[in-house]
Amino acid sequence: MKILVTGSNGLLGQKVIYGLLGDPLCLLPDDIRKKIKSEVQIIAAGKGENRIHRKDGYIYESFDMTVKAEVEKLFLKHKPDVVINTAAMTNVDACETKREECWLANVTAMQYMVDVLEKIGSHLIHISTDFVFDGMKGSEYAETDTPNPLHYYALSKLEGEKIVMKSLPAGQAGKLKWAILRTIIVYGVVDGNTRSNLVLWVKNNLDKKQKINVINDQFRAPTLSEDLAQACIVAAMKRAEGIYHVSGEKTYNILELANIIADFWKLDKSYMTSVTSEQLNQPAKRPPYTGFVIDKAKRDLGYTPRSFMEGLKIVDDQIKRSV
Ligand SMILES: NC(=O)c1ccc[n+]([C@@H]2O[C@H](COP(=O)([O-])OP(=O)(O)OC[C@H]3O[C@@H](n4cnc5c(N)ncnc54)[C@H](OP(=O)(O)O)[C@@H]3O)[C@@H](O)[C@H]2O)c1
């Protein structure tokens, strides 16, 4: 069995590769762990050079998903049984201002992938976002809730979802089987420290005694990257189908999260200023409240998210090991 992971230099992509290689922080059931070890060939595909420190146990391919010929070449060469697609243009504000680039990566490239994967008959595990929702529900979103994107990144991710879903019209046999895993602010440490996220942003700035403006009127359920990787790998191994919401269990105010992060590393909170979304005035307007109902992922994928405190301890260990 061949599993190909796109976006393997990114935060989630790296964790999926390490999870497939047996990282104990990725909590896989024993039977799945054994099956991967004995049966799975791992292919990592990223833009440019391989930035994962560990180089053995998998094949690395460089590709640009916005070039149709490169997508076709990669997939036709390996003919993967399952593709875990973590690649995307993920900078929300950059997507707002560089709309053509965003559409090319998050929509057009999805069509390139789906077209060739349909021919091969692969199973696609695609990653999407809580931002497909407008955040006005006021409570956690279920898979059955109706999306209503507020900004360009969200719109592009929703269009990407539609391309994946259209490949298998409801009730009809199609060649490409798919699952879409939507997630919410993912945090973790990547090799080479090339990716930031909420946890590292707060920690690194307060460490350096630099002032930060922290939003006090938005709510999110932070997701440990190793937990999301677990869900992706189980979905791949079980050939899960349909939409899954995969996030941390608990939804927090962002300011509350920043306070927990500062307390955890005993940092000076006087460098944090509490601001409203209106005051911060980001290019892309964010939804106010997006947690997820994660019962389906727990039931079908055995998804077991760790608490935010457990996640911070894991991040702390990884930072200590990387210096
Ligand atoms: N992080 C979050 O908080 C969050 C929240 C909700 C949903 N998601 C979704 O989760 C998925 C994974 O996100 P992530 O946090 O792992 O993001 P990430 O760290 O930005 O990883 C995305 C990867 O995609 C690669 N990529 C971008 N353009 C490419 C291209 N043209 N060809 C090939 N590869 C390309 C990037 O390459 P480079 O490394 O070279 O730039 C990067 O390694 C994405 O679909 C994202 O939309 C993330």
Image: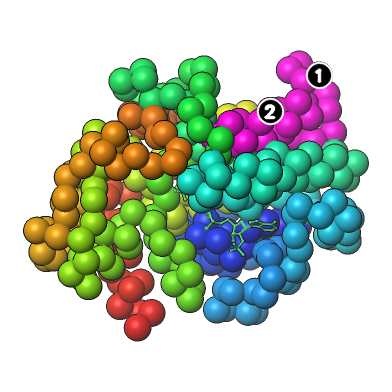
Q: Position of residue 276 (x, y in %)?
A: 23, 36
Q: Is mark 2 within 8 Å of ligand 1?
A: no
* Residue closer to the observer: 158 or 295: 158
**Label 2 vs 1, first from the N-terminus:** 2
Query: Is the residue 213 above or below the residue 10 in the image?
Result: above
Q: Residue at x 59, y 65 (%)?
A: 9
Q: Position of residue 237 (x, y in %)?
A: 64, 47
Please, what is the three-letter code of the amino acid marked with disc 1? Gln
* Residue closer to the observer: 317 or 128: 128
Magenta segment: does it hold 322?
no
Residue 162, disc: 2
Q: Position of residue 148 (x, y in %)?
A: 51, 21
Please, what is the three-letter code of the amino acid marked with disc 2? Lys
Residue 172, disc: 1
Kindly indicate whether the residue at mark 1 contacts the one at mark 2 (C-beta within 8 angstroms). Answer: no
Q: Is mark 1 within 8 Å of ligand 1?
A: no
Secondary structure of the residue carrying tag 1 is loop
Left or right, 230 with respect to 46, comes to left
Q: Residue at x 32, y 60 (%)?
A: 201
Which stretch is magenta?
154-182
Left or right, 47 with respect to 276, comes to right
Q: Residue at x 13, y 65 (%)?
A: 267
